[in-house]
Image (cartoon, grey):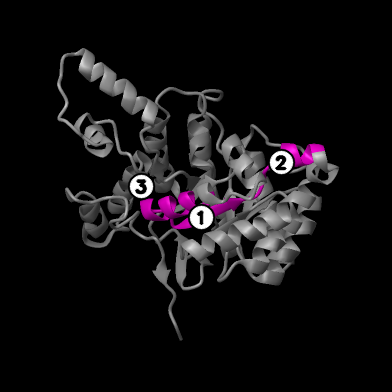
Amino acid sequence: MTRTIVESKTKTAIIGFDQPFCVIGERINPTGRKKLAAELEVGDFSTVEADAVAQAACGATILDVNSGAVFSNKMAEDPRYADNNFVEPPLMRELCARVQALVDVPICIDSSVPEALEAGLEVCEGRPLVNSVTGEEERLEQVLPLIKKYNVPVVAISNDDTGISDDPNVRFAVAKKIVERAADFGIPAHDIVVDPLVMPIGAKPTAGLQVFELVRRLRDELGVNTTCGASNVSFAMPNRHGINNAFLPMAYSMGMTSAIMNPCALPVTQKKIAEKKAEVLAAGITLPEGIDDATFVKLFGLGSTTPRPGGEMEAIRAANLLMDQDPHGATWIAHNKPDAGAGGAAGGRSGRRRRRG
């Protein structure tokens, strides 16, 4: 049975067909997060640290750490900052060091810059996952030697020099090529986690069916584990969480073993709390004197003032139960007790203690 082993200093996460679904937390990524990128530019890692703690508490099995920041202000002062090869290696080193100092959760080192991948590999304790290699020849020659040198698993993305194909057969062929090229370097198939590339259902109505078939073929024909950017499937659609909540268990049942996703439901903003209070008062409802935000939010069903496991995590826990990967339903029961919170049985498997020989 294919098992991909990812480790932190003392904990082991196993991605496999006979394992609970593996959640790779996606939040430590400055791409598209201008506020986070601006913080990193001035050496402020407070959001990174908060995201690391929250995702671990909400059930992430592995934490993705992405160093793809754009430092616009520094770029204007020093042209070297326009080059990701200059920016990312030291940033990746600092990100990985800070995350593993706070939480004992395996790390997924995420960058398109080989030097940044190696910087992360140099500081990460245990056995991190590397994200990623593609089918482009130049990329294969740059990344696969690193994977072999450090004896770590890698995410293989199913695109090559021709780009991302709409044809799932082509994407399967790219994945097969990467697995075969990895074997040339002495890298076993169980250390390859294929991302078959999930397309948005809003742009391509057959995207869901395509990825389900691709995942099944990758499991049955190549015997490899799989992952994806889970929210891609719902991009630009209304009620994205509803789509994600259906997609994840369906993909899991076809053989998908992990996903890069946000395990947290984000806290209610102060703006939303203020708007709701105004609405309540306008309706003639008198609030108890001195009511705190946490009580108010809970009373009116707005969510929570602190990060908590999102609906996707509930869908995954239910899928683990239905796929017989939750012995005696222990995780499901623990998470559905009245007092269960983000720090309870978080996600069912925040990491296994590494066995000592």
Nearest to viewer (mark 3 / mark 2):
2
- 132 inside magenta stretch: no
> Magenta span covers which residues?
48-76
Q: Given contact means CB atoms under 8 Å apart, are the residues at marks 3 and 2 in contact?
A: no
Question: What number of labels is visible?
Answer: 3
The image shows residue 137 at horizontal and vertical percentages of 80, 51
Q: Is residue 114 above or below residue 76?
A: below
Left of 311 or right of it: where is 136?
A: right
Left of 295 or right of it: where is 163?
A: right
Left of 9 or right of it: where is 310?
A: left
Question: Gap between marks 3 and 2, in whole Å?
Answer: 36 Å
Residue nearest the viewer, comparing 192 with 115: 115
Residue nearest the viewer, comparing 272 with 266: 272
**Dot 3: what SS?**
helix
Name the residue at 20% across, 34% down. 291
Residue nearest the viewer, comparing 303 with 110: 303
- N-term-proximal mark, 2 vs 1: 1
Nearest to viewer (mark 3 / mark 1):
1
The image shows residue 29 at horizontal and vertical percentages of 58, 45
The image shows residue 290 at horizontal and vertical percentages of 20, 34
Name the residue at 17% across, 26% down. 287
- N-term-proximal mark, 3 vs 2: 2
Residue 3 at least partly seen = no
Q: Which residue is under mark 3?
A: 316
Nearest to viewer (mark 2 / mark 1):
2
Left of 170 or right of it: where is 50?
A: left
Name the residue at 43% across, 54% down. 53
Q: Which residue is under mark 2?
A: 71
Local crowd at mark 2 within 10 Å, few (<14), some, or many (≥20)?
many
| Amino acid type, mark 1 | Leu
Q: Which residue is under mark 1?
A: 63
